[in-house]
Image: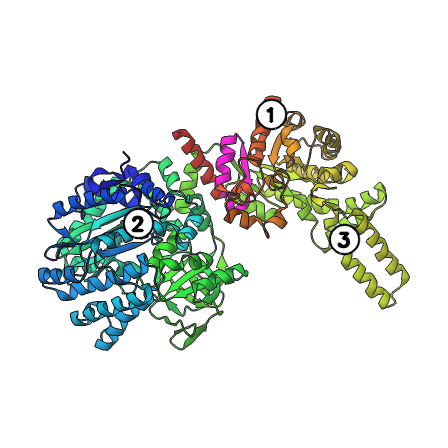
Amino acid sequence: MVKRVYDFAEGNKDMKDLLGGKGANLAEMVNMGLRVPPGFTITTKTCAEFFAAKGNFPDGLWEDVLFHLKGIEKATDKKFGDGKNPLLFSVRSGAPRSMPGMMDTVLNLGINDVVAAGLAKLTKDERFVYDAYRRFVTMFADVVMGTERKEFDAIHEAWKKKEGVKSDPELSAMALKSVVAEQKKLYKKVVKREFPEDPYEQLRLAIAAVFNSWNTPRAITYRKMERIPDDMGTACNIQTMVFGNLGDDSGSGVLFTRDPSSGEKKILGELLFNAQGEDVVAGIRTPIGLDDLKKQMPKIHKELVGIVEKLESHYKDMQDVEFTIERDTLYMLQCRNAKRTAKAAVKCAVDMVEEKLIDEKEAILRVEPKQIELLLHKTIDPATDKKAICRGLPASPGASTGQVVFVPKEAEEWKAAGKKVILVRPETTPEDIAGMVAAEGILTSRGGMTSHAAIVARGIGKPAIVGCEALHIDLDKEVFTVGETVVKKGDLITIDGLTADVYLGEVEFIEPKVGGEVATLLGWADKYRRLGVWANANDEKDAMKAYENGAAGIGLTRTERMFLGVERVALVREMIMADTKEDRQKALDKLLPMQKKDFKSLLRAMKGKPVQIRLLDPPLHEFMPREVDVITEIYELEKAKAPKKEIEAKRVLLGKVRRIQEANPMIGLRACRVGVMYPEIYETQAKAIFEAACELKKEGDDPHPEIMIPGTITWRELAYLKPFVVKAYDEAMQKYGEKIIFKYGTMIEMPRAALTADEMAKECDFFSFGTNDLTQTGMGLSRDDAQGTFLPIYVEKKILPDDPFQTLDKKGVGELVKICVKLARPANPKIKIGICGEHGGDPESIYFFHEAGLDYVSCSPFRIPVARLAAARIAILSEKK
């Protein structure tokens, strides 16, 4: 018989796939002897059964729940639904992968009119009881029945105004009774039925709601962003309630064992006295810090610090802990590996190695490649003369500029329209997740470092400032004010999540540098990775950044980029317009010194590391004006009665433009086919490369150029073109009296090249997969057309798992890569094989390239640190298999 329900004492931390993260860690804390309110967990597999049964409980589940509920009654000496000594529950979600705030929770479940009366008599505190009751009605209506929470909250807020109080604990018991009565009337009005008084009905509906919360829009958005499988499901945890809202000797809080923003080794926590946990996370009241707890409850503070230090040592990772104090007794409600900023992730990993909690390999696995990428974003120049208009709490570092929006849905719409936005809210809720993802940054007027906005922003890597109390937000008018300053929707602001400063307009940013803990971590990564990491660089500036970021070489230099600029484009057009080889060579001779200068600066910047230079790749028509533009020019010249000679020259140009136009230039006269048709183009480019290398050699450098032929489909193209390259090499060596070593290779961009790699390899020193074009030719997709039309829909409908131009199509294009490697190695054991498409900087694709046996990946200079870490992670993970 399948076991669907586990008491906390039956599980452990290694059962996350079955019990979810929350359930597994609650079980682990019980095993550690910590004070955890008793409860049980319904498994993630049961969630899958629930969905398979179209939202019905699988046979036997309810009986299992009732059996375990009886066990809790026995352990607590309380009875569920009893008016004399009632037992109340929290019902909470808990997926195998942490999704903070994305799924649902119901607190104080089991309360009704009879239970409330009995609980009031038992506790002698009517105010507490009806505060718990109004919270339950609000949560049940919102989470379980899907109504608008704000209408229920509005009743509570209206009574606070009636009594002239500002904070929740000041509201009287009589007022809270009225709140409950009015909320139940509202419930009947919007739900069209009475509020359920039967605790067992409440429980059954709440369990179903927790399972259903797996498929809410916010949960789906978060899973898509974090690449969490849709079929993972959530567990459901039913746990005995303990109450932080029983008075001033009670409270609820959240803490981190280290600073989740900076990674600094200090316990960072917040709590509210006389409050439940939802108040802390929602950010609607400003919490106090742990220092205040130490002053008011020194024994509790000491116990709490001891427990969380024990938890961090046990899990060997930063912990996010939820706790409740009920009448001077401390209870642990949750622990999990904390969501943290990229900066904190790196610092924690490095510090924990130094503290001998983990080793270098584990440190590498602790940091996601995308977190390294976030650290390489620009920051605000500290020398800026702009003055901040206000300052809040630094919830998540990074700097961003954008137009102010107040509505999360508008953030999505403006992002879709190509605008950059900053989402400004009093506080955020789980429903805001899509807008938070769309925004460049988040700014709230309320909440602390453990509020929803802070936790989610750190998790998704967005700059965020919270608790900016100088900010007065009017959501109806869509403006905020700071003193006399008024900022409207659409106005430009800049936020700095590191300093928590807010600026009007744009502020100067500076480029980050790899150093400190990042450099340490990447140094460890270099020790363990097998794949080399090279860079795609088109000029000296790119090459210098590549060298600075640790590139082992340049894997792709696009020589056509060197033809840009008015003067150079004019010379390229002169070459294209030439009718004879001699005239073509004259234009090429004018381009040669320009190209030589470019190659020289590029080779010099890499200081002796290899540089792969791709000869001319695009079709020639890309350098020519558009047909419609030439026709327009002819029309204007004729209209202005320009000289016939000038008009005739334009007509000649139009004729050439029309002759070189192609129906499908992607697979037309381009790449090596241009070289075969006009070998003097490739020969001149090779001459510029070798002369640049020789001049550098004379200056004391040690250049290593590698000539890459693009777009080949047969070994005969390579064999045909090689003599022209060798001729250019011989002439340069003779001219300068130098001897340099060069390599000759090709880009694998066409399926036929991959499938005949054994023949191609005999002509080459290296292969480099051009996976952008290999994806186009292998999948029959035009990237420029597909990405703007049907491809996003294919991904959304799960017809394709990912955009294949961002993450390699492993089953199709990846199979071509594997076949190519398998054929090439025996034919040429010394051949070097790498990849220089956009996939070279994508961690998921890098994992595949490691397993496929490539020697290196080449990516943007700015993604080199990402690739270095990703290559190390897959090497370490492969060892563990």
Q: Name the residue under label 3.
A: 570
| Residue at horizontal 12 percent and vertical 64 percent from the top | 125
Task: Look at the numbered disc 2 and give the secondary structure of its residue.
Answer: strand
First in sequence, mark 2 or 3: give its number.
Answer: 2
Q: Is residue 851 magenta?
A: yes
| Residue at horizontal 65 percent and vertical 32 percent from the top | 753
Left or right: where 681 falls relative to 167: right
Query: Crowdedness of circle 3 by 10 Å Cα count: few (<14), some, many (20+)?
Result: some
Region rendered in magenta: 844-864
Q: In which quarter of the image is residue 108?
A: bottom left
Q: Name the residue under label 1.
A: 823
Query: Crowdedness of circle 2 by 10 Å Cα count: few (<14), some, many (20+)?
Result: many
| Residue at horizontal 59 percent and vertical 21 percent from the top | 826
Q: What residue type is labelled 1?
A: Leu
Where's residue 641, x and y in %? 88, 67
Q: Is residue 735 above or below residue 371?
A: above
What's the mark number on residue 486? Answer: none
Callout 2–callout 3 Cβ contact below 8 Å: no
Task: Look at the numbered disc 1 and give the secondary structure of its residue.
Answer: helix
- Name the colour scheme: rainbow
Q: Is residue 745 visible?
A: no
In depth, the one of 53 and 755 nearer the eye is 53
Where's residue 760, x and y in %? 66, 28
Quadrant location of the N terminus in the rendered image? top left
Q: Closer to the observer: label 3 or label 1?
A: 1
In depth, the one of 645 and 324 nearer the eye is 324
Q: Mark 2 points at which residue?
A: 93
